[in-house]
């Protein structure tokens, strides 16, 4: 595996202060995702997709528009699991046939609530902490003004966390949901694909004329989703072929990502995944999942021995960079119609010279890939090349955990000029209805 030495043209700056609300959601022009030429695995991936994967035509029916449907608001989504989905995951249906009216597959929860602050961040004096009190009945305006016609449209507020439930599918201020899965759920046996888990979760959103973001990770913290066994995101059959692993403090098992067998198996899975969902009108974007929780780093545990742990199975920043490039190339080789979003976050844990966050961000933007900020923080700004491709803004955590105020969080998200804003389900409540409605009402005006 060879590393690619890109000029470090970018440093993602973090500035704390009294940031003013951006008046205009301008965003960046949409980029067509290129098809990398000469990717060594492309031919084999294409053969796999053509020979072994059910036709995408059998997937969930298309949704024509992400615009929120009219109707009464759903009940508060304060419950972590919601809709009784705290039970074990639905059984794998290898036939991949959609199941009408099926419950959510599992109570998939969000990645950790720590802000996604890169290791090379620059900060100044932080602003005063946001009050933890309830959002005022008439919150300060967070409504952006109209933008030039060249800008991509803002596509609304998406529910995030709290399980892959349909609880908010009829909420007029919610345009869709982020659905999170683990590879081991979707391919428990080699070549056996459990698409019914995704199909049944997508169905109520598509039926409501709304859309979803799909994320499939190979590793996660053990506590994130016990029902989905997030601590064992990579299938057991992958390890049985000789792929090494590390076991974190919380018991989570994480793979030797750069192992050629792991890469080959993941390539084959991604070819099947794309054959099923690429171009589906109910899918607004697919997250490019690289490391823990799908983000770009290998591990996010606060483990003082994190680097020695990973070095015990051969980790180096150069190997990680080779694996990251390989995975990005695989996604762009198999997804041609559905936008892809990369989630950069402290990509390199080794601290080697020349391996900083600019390397992966520049690489993704050069390919026209969207960027997803998985830790929106009030008062923080992101510097170029953020904004040169569309941005998805994800709250760093539920306000009940962070102490933030939702109006402040949404104001910070709006300042990133996003195409989507991912809001924790526990904050999509009647108490926050006014501020949510202000943002949701701008759907389609520009972003």
Image (cartoon, grey):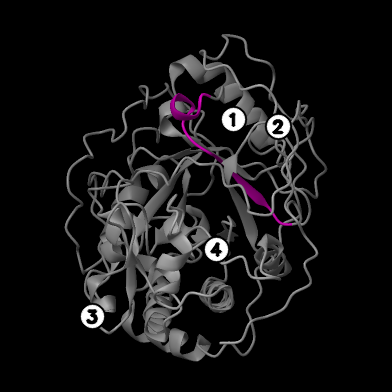
Find disc 3 in the rendering and name its residue: 240
Q: Give the mark toward the camera: 4 or 2.
A: 4
The N terminus - image quarter: bottom right
Q: Quadrant of residue 169?
A: top left
For label 4, the residue is 349
Mark 2 or mark 1, whichever is nearer to me: 2
Q: Is residue 76 magenta?
A: no
Q: Which mark is residue 440?
A: 1
* Image quadrant in which you'd find residue 127: top right
User: Label 3 to label 2, Cα distance in Å?
Assistant: 47 Å
Residue 437: in sight, yes or no? no
Task: Identify which residue is drawn at 74% across, 51% down.
Answer: 387
Q: Identify the secondary structure beneath mark 3.
A: loop
Q: Which residues are magenta?
A: 389-403
Mark 3, Cα crowd under 10 Å, few <14 / some 14-19 / many 20+, is few
Count the labels in the image: 4
Name the residue at 72% across, 36% down.
415
Q: CA distance from mark 2 to mark 1?
A: 22 Å
Q: Residue at x 79, y 30 (%)?
A: 23
Q: Position of residue 176 (x, y in %)?
A: 47, 41
């Amino acid at each position: 595996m060879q590393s690619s030495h890109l000029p470090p043209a970018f440093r993602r700056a973090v500035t704390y202060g009294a940031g003013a609300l951006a008046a205009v959601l301008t965003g960046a022009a949409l980029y067509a995702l290129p098809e990398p030429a000469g990717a060594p695995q492309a031919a084999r991936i294409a053969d796999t997709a053509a020979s072994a994967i059910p036709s995408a035509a059998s997937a969930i029916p298309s949704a024509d528009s992400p615009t929120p449907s009219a109707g009464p608001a759903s009940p508060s989504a304060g419950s972590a699991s919601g809709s009784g989905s705290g039970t074990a995951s639905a059984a794998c249906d290898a036939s991949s046939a959609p199941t009408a009216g099926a419950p959510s597959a599992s109570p998939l929860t969000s990645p950790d609530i720590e802000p996604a602050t890169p290791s090379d961040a620059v900060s100044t004096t932080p602003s005063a902490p946001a009050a933890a009190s309830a959002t005022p009945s008439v919150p300060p305006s967070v409504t952006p003004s109209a933008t030039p016609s060249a800008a991509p449209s803002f596509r609304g507020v998406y529910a995030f966390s709290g399980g892959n439930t349909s609880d908010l599918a009829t909420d007029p201020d919610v345009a869709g949901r982020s659905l999170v899965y683990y590879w081991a759920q979707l391919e428990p046996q080699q070549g056996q694909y459990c698409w019914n888990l995704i199909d049944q979760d997508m169905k109520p959103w598509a039926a409501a004329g709304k859309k979803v973001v799909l994320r499939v990770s190979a590793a996660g913290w053990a506590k994130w989703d016990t029902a989905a066994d997030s601590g064992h995101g990579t299938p057991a059959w992958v390890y049985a072929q000789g792929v090494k692993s590390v076991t974190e403090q919380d018991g989570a098992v994480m793979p030797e990502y750069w192992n050629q067998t792991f890469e080959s198996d993941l390539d084959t899975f991604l070819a099947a995944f794309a054959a099923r969902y690429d171009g589906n009108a109910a899918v607004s974007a697919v997250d490019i999942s690289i490391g823990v929780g799908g983000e770009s780093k290998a591990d996010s545990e606060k483990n003082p021995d994190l680097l020695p742990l990973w070095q015990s199975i051969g980790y180096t920043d150069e190997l990680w960079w080779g694996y990251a490039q390989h995975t990005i190339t695989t996604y762009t080789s198999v997804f041609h119609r559905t936008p892809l979003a990369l989630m950069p976050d402290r990509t390199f844990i080794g601290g080697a010279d020349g391996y900083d966050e600019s390397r992966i961000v520049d690489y993704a933007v050069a390919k026209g890939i969207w960027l997803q900020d998985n830790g929106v923080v009030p008062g923080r700004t992101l510097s170029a090349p953020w904004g040169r491709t569309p941005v998805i803004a994800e709250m760093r955590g539920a306000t009940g955990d962070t102490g933030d105020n939702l109006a402040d969080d949404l104001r910070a998200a709006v300042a990133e000029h996003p195409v989507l804003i991912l809001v924790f389900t526990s904050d999509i409540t009647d108490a926050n209805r006014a501020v949510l409605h202000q943002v949701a009402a701008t759907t389609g005006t520009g972003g």
